[in-house]
Amino acid sequence: MEILRTENLVKTYGTGENAFNAVDDISISIQEGEFVAIVGSSGSGKSTLMHMIGGVDRPTSGKIIINDQDITQLNNDKLAVFRRKNIGIVYQFYNLIPILTAEENITLPTQLDGQKTNKERLDDILEKLGISNKRNNLPNELSGGQQQRVSIARAIINNPAILLADEPTGNLDSKATDDIINLLKMTNKTYNQTIVMITHNPQIAKEADRVITIRDGKVSEEV
Amino acid sequence: MKIMNKLTLKNLRMNKARTVVTIIGIMLSVALITVVTGMVSSVLETMIVTNIKNTGDYDISASGKFEERFIEKVKNNSDVRDLYTRQYMGLAEFSDSKASYVPFIKVFGLNKNCFESGFDLSLSEGKFPENSGELLLSQDFVKQSGKKYHAGDKITLSYGQRYYKTDKETAKKIGIENITSEPIRSSLPYSEDVEEFKKQNEKTYTIAGILNSSGGSINDMYAFSCVCVYTLADINSPAETNITSDDLINGYAETNQTIFIRFNDGAENRYKEIFADLLGTNVDYINDQYNLSEKEYEQFNSDCEKSGVRALYFSANSSLLMSKGIDINDKNLSILIALIGFVLFIIVIASVFIIRNSFDISITEKTKLYGMLSATGATPRQIKHNVYFEGIFLGMIGIPLGIFLGIGTTAVLIWICNTVLTDVLEGTNFIFKISFIGLLASLVLSAVTIFFSSMNTAKRASKIPPIEAIRSNADIKISAKNKKKLKTPGFITKLFGAGGNIAWKNMKRNRKKYRATVISIVLSVAVYISIYSFMDYNLVYINEKFINSPYNVEVSINTVDTETGEPLSPDKLIEKYNSIASLENVDNYIYSTYMSVEMSFASNNLTDEFKNTSYSNGNVIIDDEKCIVWGNIKAVDDNNFKKIAESNGMTFEDCKDKFFIYNTVKITDSNKKKSEYLKFLKTAENTPLTLKFELYDKNKEEYITTEKNVTLAGSTKYIQTQPVTTYDDNIPIIYISMENYLKIFGNNEYLFFNMSVNSSDADKFEENLNELSNTDKSIKIDNIFNYSKILHQLNAITLILQIFVYGFIIVISLIGLTNVFNTITANMRLRRKEFAVLQSIGMTKREFNRMISLESLLYTLKSLLIGIPLGIISSILIYNIYASNLDDGLMPYIFPGLAVLISTVVVLIIVWFIMRFSIRKVRKQNIIETIRNDNI
């Protein structure tokens, strides 16, 4: 089923003469369970696109429909609630709350929702991501790769509709990069998790099922 | 270097709020230091001016007999600025005197200097005398003179001497076998019956003017029975009357010559050496004037004689010298200096603490910047200088502003003191003076404070490795505590949700960040509560002593039968007191007397609580039959005894012979510092008791013990006889009428009364009483204690104390507040990314607010939980100091509830406001920009 659709999405920065469309009329559709990579050079608008999809930024015009819900119609509070139930985001760096342990960081979205953590799911995710023994460590005790794993775990704990990853391996060495990409693929396969990943590295992009190239704010090609 | 400085300035401008707040913090510290130094210099100047007004502008005064060559030597000495001289011209009859006991006028000749600069001589009319034929009248003269004199009038003085009468009776009265033909010293009080005045010559003067002030030291202190007037005469001008050739009477110098020396400003601190030099003697003799051995004393006298000085007595104007900083050997002064030093020390410590914290925050925010600078090639030294630059820049703005603020505040404080304390100061004025040294001290102290604050910070900044710039992990250090699995209390999560969880963990794991804030709040709260308690006890003490009293004036008089010179007989005495009681402006009065007697009661009439009290009372002996106790029989005037009678349902006539007991005794256990009020007798009516006392029998010339059996008629409440509570209720008191008292103790030789009056216009009453004493010669006023005046003064002083102390606290707290503000806002900004992440995960606005609110609530509560008990403990300590130093009555401990409440509310409000302010700034941020933008 279609889990994400954007319709004529536009994001404009600046006014009057200096007006510039970072995202210039993008319409895409993503099915549940797809692993999509969005590529493009710096400044192409991919990050802007992803952040609008993630509900962290508002479009100038156009619609975003996730799980049959038009999130552009939601107010800030409702959007926040929607985010924690339906979207998981992983950034390039600084994802974690420094004063919470790995486990506490992971269960954060659940807690925000007022739900009790499903212990089994937690243990399962910790193990699958290979960080069971680090569950009680603080972020500054973890390596970059471990931190990203924790981020991913947090992003998927609530079984979100979409996992968005903005250059998740940009900060990691090659081994860690491979690990993370493999983990993402595993997550995608095991939990049928829809993943939309931004990268400017074509090698990494190849690992995805589908690659959407963005150029100057428009979709340039889809593979 | 310029680039780095530019960076610093830009950073300061970007963080306007923090920069302004830091500058305010510096300003307040500097202002506080300036106020302290300003007050010190003002008080010193005031002391100097007041001393000059009270005594005169001189360093040493000396009396004796000075030859002209000595006078010339002093005048010509290069270290002497001024020489003032006073010559005793003679004694004259004061024929216009209103009172017979002030029958003389003492005439003094002052040299020109005196009228020009030496003393506080203000005229109410006329001018100063310009020759020895003109007189300047003193205020005393004007008050005592029945005839009114004005400038331009002529007055004739009959000069003469006082001599003892030569008859046998006089000799017997004085106790001198052979009365010499020497005159009586002018310093002895006048006694009409034994002396006579022998006139020698007359002189007519023109009155030049009338003095308005006392004049200070040119006034003769020993002028009993005289008033003083002044004329213009140099020292060694001939006196108007013949004083014996050596000018000594009965071996004492007549103090007919007194000189006052004012040394030059720069030479004042060597006054002893210069004076010794002028006398041609050793300076040790000057230092130890009173402790010389006989031989040394001889040597000293011989030296003086060689220089032309005889019968020398000298003293330094120590109060003036002390206010100029010379000869400070007063223990009290060193305590005062220590106190001021301590206050300055606290201010400096608080300032260093705050300013350093401010710089620390600035560093933490610029960690990336310094790391990057280090990476691009800035040496540690350059970075250190950059931090100093920030300090210098902020200091250059803050310090001058602070100094101006301090000067202005000092002026305002002085004005407040003058306004509030006008009555207390009685004419003295606080003078506002800022000394250059004081300002310099403030400047240096502030600069040093800022330097020390930035020194440590600079060192840390220079050591930041470049890698920290990128990682910025330095904030949370690994510590064993952090590894523990921290469980948030259930109710927190229930009430505040996930946000609460984060807030709780933040408080537990991130203590260091808020340590400065917590300490600031703790200190402010603790100090405020302590000071509040201190002030409270002062007020309670004053209240207890004065406000609740039924009387506000205490009258103390001496009475003597003007004809016989003997004490008045009892009924005449009562007459006199009644005449005082019937004066105008007396609303209420009481006069009483008492006798201590031994009382014995039947033991079975004592209350159980009295018999069984565990407190010790040395006055009481109890056995199965009798209880023997020392008590007071108090006699009160008829008016008041009538009230006692009426309270028992009887008339005065019925009760004239009756005895009423105050049936409560206060037993105090001095070890436990507590007291109990116990009912004494089970029944008072118709209770028999035996009084035992001693009376002096004039005929037998010995003390005779008398026993008397009486019966109590009833009881009464405690009758207060004095304005200030006397706490004499630790023994039984029995009240009787005056008549009854005289009947029982009538033969007692000396009868004395205590009298207290309640007057709505106590000053007027004082005037009326003075007039009465002037007309009725048998009444001599010993003292009038005007307690409403004293109360008024105490209240004024307390008000000033409150203004200063609370003002000080508020400023220190404000300085602490700047600290709190900076810490909180900085912490908020440093956690922007954290907040952005939370928002991106899906935290709503409300949840976010709740998290921040809980966080501020948590560490505020922590601060209060430490600060309030600390404050209470120190208030208990203060109470102990108070209670142990007061020996009259016992003050109960007062819990500083209001202070606790006020500080809690104020702290919560302030912290809440600051939090809201920083939240607003954080919430406005764009989530994406924040997370992605490493450069923020």
Image: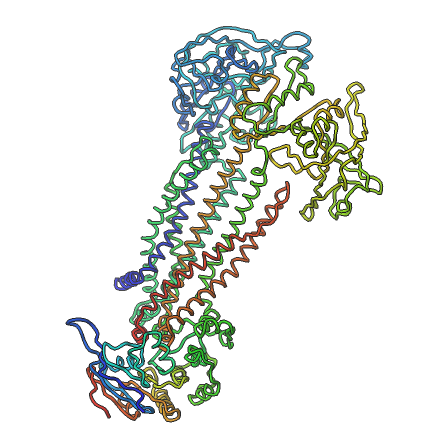
Q: Percent from the top left, x then y, of residue B484?
A: 51, 76
Q: Identify the image quadrant of the C terminus of chain B.
A: bottom left
- Left or right of A51, for residue B351: right
Q: Is residue B736 visible?
A: yes
Q: Residue at x 47, y 25 (%)?
A: B216
Q: Percent from the top left, x then y, of residue B452?
A: 40, 57
Q: Identify the image quadrant of the N terminus of chain B.
A: bottom left
Farthest-out residue, left: A17
Q: Residue at x 48, y 35 (%)?
A: B322
- Left or right of B822, for residue A13: left
Front-most of residues B387 and B249: B387
Which of the colour schemes (rainbow, by chain, secondary structure, one colour) is used?
Answer: rainbow
Front-most of residues B319 and B834: B834
Q: Is residue A204 visible?
A: no
Q: Percent from the top left, x then y, of residue B474?
A: 40, 72
Q: Is residue B916 above or below residue B839?
A: above
Front-most of residues B284 and A185: A185
Q: How many marks?
A: 0
Farthest-out residue, right: B625
For residue B655, what is the image quadrant? top right
